[in-house]
């Protein structure tokens, strides 16, 4: 069971939720997900909603390894049409804004977003956590070691699981003290982690249950899948499905994906398994 509350609305489900990724950028690591033309963005949104996505996560800033931050004006220009379209066309679908900037978060919520997804957990903008508290929306707090342009240079941990549990314990306290009522945690696969770090986290996902918060995972087509297989993001859908299945069996509540149909199938089959 997962329940999210935002601005007087409630999203309640007895099964895991599927969050579809809308990249309003020109530089995603998975080229097929990079969308700049509004008609293509709207078409992708239509497809995801028709396939049953519970949440649509809109972002205007690529965060792949080595990426640099775009200007505030560009990010705002990129995300605004998608959120406005979702709010007017699919008012029952929850919209998430994927950003590290508090000003973008505020603008997105004004346009109709219901939650904020920050890859830096509020660390890249000191105003983010206070802003989310004022907006009264759920906050997806992700872990990232370093910054997107440097995070994969030399990731290091003593005990990656213990360090992330400790990180989230402190972040949850910080968020609650600021006034954020609902926090969702995301281990940040591929964000300042080696291949070994990523799979250690997958193996021990169940340990995050002690934090008593919903757990979001984002494996979709990442290098942690295609590098061991010697393929590419374009050939990483099957591997994504495997890891999504493992994650749901170990306590994940939200799957963040490029491919909604396949993620929905995972959720349905896990639901069937749990009813058996």
Image (cartoon, rainbow, N blue to C red):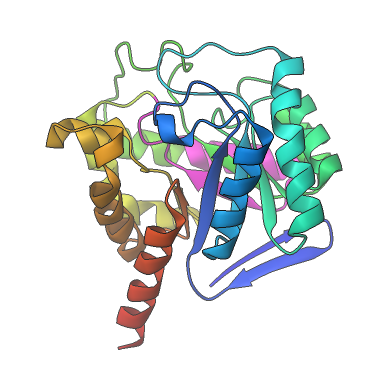
The residue sitting at 60% across, 44% down in the picture is 57
Where residue 256 sits in the image (x, y, percent)? 47, 48
Q: Which of the image's four quarters has the C terminus?
A: bottom left
Where residue 76 sits in the image (x, y, percent)? 75, 25
Q: Within the magenta stretch, is there residue 99?
A: no
103 with respect to 224 (left or right): right
**Is 145 placed above or below 205 here?**
above
Residue 27 visible, this angle: yes
**Is 101 placed above or below 211 here?**
above
- The quadrant holding residue 176 is top right
Where residue 95 sits in the image (x, y, percent)? 69, 50
Where residue 78 sits in the image (x, y, percent)? 69, 27
Closer to the camera, 63 or 152? 63
Judged from this view, the residue extending furthest toward the bottom is 276
**Is 179 placed above or below 207 here?**
above
219 with respect to 129 (left or right): left
**Magenta region: which residues?**
167-191
Q: Within the magenta stretch, is there residue 181?
A: yes
Closer to the camera, 145 or 270? 270
Closer to the camera, 231 or 228? 231
The residue sitting at 23% across, 40% down in the picture is 199
């Amino acid at each position: 069971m997962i329940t999210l509350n935002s601005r007087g609305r409630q999203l309640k489900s007895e099964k895991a939720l599927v969050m579809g990724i809308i990249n309003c950028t020109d530089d995603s690591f998975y080229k097929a997900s990079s969308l700049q033309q509004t008609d293509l963005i709207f078409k992708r949104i239509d497809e995801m909603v028709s396939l049953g996505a519970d949440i649509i996560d809109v972002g205007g800033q690529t965060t792949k390894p080595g990426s640099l931050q775009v200007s505030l004006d560009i990010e705002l220009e990129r995300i605004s049409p998608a959120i406005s379209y979702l709010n007017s066309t699919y008012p029952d679908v929850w919209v998430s804004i994927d950003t590290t900037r508090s000003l973008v978060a505020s603008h997105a919520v004004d346009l109709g977003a219901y939650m904020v997804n920050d890859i830096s957990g509020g660390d890249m903008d000191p105003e983010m956590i206070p802003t989310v508290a004022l907006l009264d929306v759920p906050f997806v707090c992700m872990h990232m070691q370093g910054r997107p342009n440097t995070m994969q240079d030399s990731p290091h941990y003593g005990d990656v699981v213990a360090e992330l549990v400790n990180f989230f314990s402190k972040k949850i306290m910080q968020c609650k003290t600021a006034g954020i009522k609902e926090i969702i945690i995301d281990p940040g696969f591929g964000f300042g982690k080696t291949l070994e770090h990523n799979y250690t986290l997958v193996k021990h996902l169940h340990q995050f249950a002690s934090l008593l918060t919903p757990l979001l995972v984002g494996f979709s087509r990442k290098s942690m899948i295609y590098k061991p297989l010697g393929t590419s993001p374009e050939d990483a859908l099957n591997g994504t499905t495997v890891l999504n299945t493992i994650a749901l069996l170990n306590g994940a509540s939200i799957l963040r994906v490029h491919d909604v149909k396949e993620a929905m199938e995972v959720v349905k089959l896990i639901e069937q398994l749990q009813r058996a």
